[in-house]
Amino acid sequence: DAGITQSPRYKITETGRQVTLMCHQTWSHSYMFWYRQDLGHGLRLIYYSAAADITDKGEVPDGYVVSRSKTENFPLTLESATRSQTSVYFCASSESMREGDIQYFGAGTRLSVL
Amino acid sequence: AQTVTQSQPEMSVQEAETVTLSCTYDTSESNYYLFWYKQPPSRQMILVIRQEAYKQQNATENRFSVNFQKAAKSFSLKISDSQLGDTAMYFCALDRDDKIIFGKGTRLHILP
């Protein structure tokens, strides 16, 4: 079915391990985003991408790596997970970055780093 | 300074009542967009309503409406005839500098 899907829904990992969160959208939206949601902080932008092979940092990029080799996929990698990266991660997409364009969100991945 | 402020961390109302969630924001732009997103327990973020700052008329979507006060930089969400399914976290958001800035959210409980 069309939309934006994230996998896995839940992930438990250990400090120092590498973990990749997947995001896939079927709308051919140009823009894709990664947010993290933490109590007391709302949603904060980690990275975003304007198109394949174009990515840029958001508000909290440290400790994360992204890639976008295909328009429909935008994986987020934690190269060496830390406990402070325990969070709920949301991927989103939009047609453009024009003001007012709606971002459509995936269902989120709850990541616990032990 | 916080760009988008939601001053009510948590609220509870009885089913069928009307509830208003407050939001204030900061921007120097003359035109911009504001959003309310709903996040139910399923975690899925859903757009509730969108308002363009140039439009005088307050946006409405069925039981959801906003009170947009541009001079006061206020953007409150009113939910009429509240239903149990309205129980969720609600986020106010501002489209600024090509990014969407979210408030910290208001957790709303609709009580039977």
Image: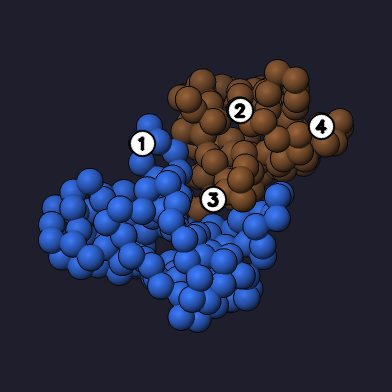
Label 1 in the same subunit as label 2? no
The residue nearer to you, when weighing B16 against A62, is A62
Label 1 in the same subunit as label 4? no
Residue A45 seen in the current view: yes
Task: Tell which subunit mark 1 falls on.
Answer: A
The circle on residue B45 is 3
Which mark's residue is nearer the viewer, 4 or 2?
Answer: 2
Q: Quick check: marks 4 and 2 in contact, CB under 8 Å?
A: no
Label 4 in the same subunit as label 3? yes
Look at label 3 and name its amino acid: Met
Residue B109 seen in the current view: no
- Residue at image coords 51%, 53%: B44
Dot 2 corresponds to which residue? Answer: B26
Q: Which chain is brown?
A: B
Task: Tell which subunit mark 3 falls on.
Answer: B
Q: Position of residue A49 (x, y in %)?
A: 51, 65
Which mark's residue is nearer the viewer, 3 or 2?
Answer: 2
Which mark's residue is nearer the viewer, 1 or 2?
Answer: 2
Name the residue at the bottom extreme: A70
User: How far separated are the C-alphas under marks 4 and 3?
Assistant: 22 Å
Look at label 2 and name its amino acid: Asp
Dot 1 corresponds to which residue? Answer: A39
Q: Position of residue B49 (x, y in %)?
A: 70, 42
Dot 4 corresponds to which residue? Answer: B58
- Residue at image coords 61%, 70%: A30
Tell me if residue A12 comes above or below residue B47 in the rendering.
below
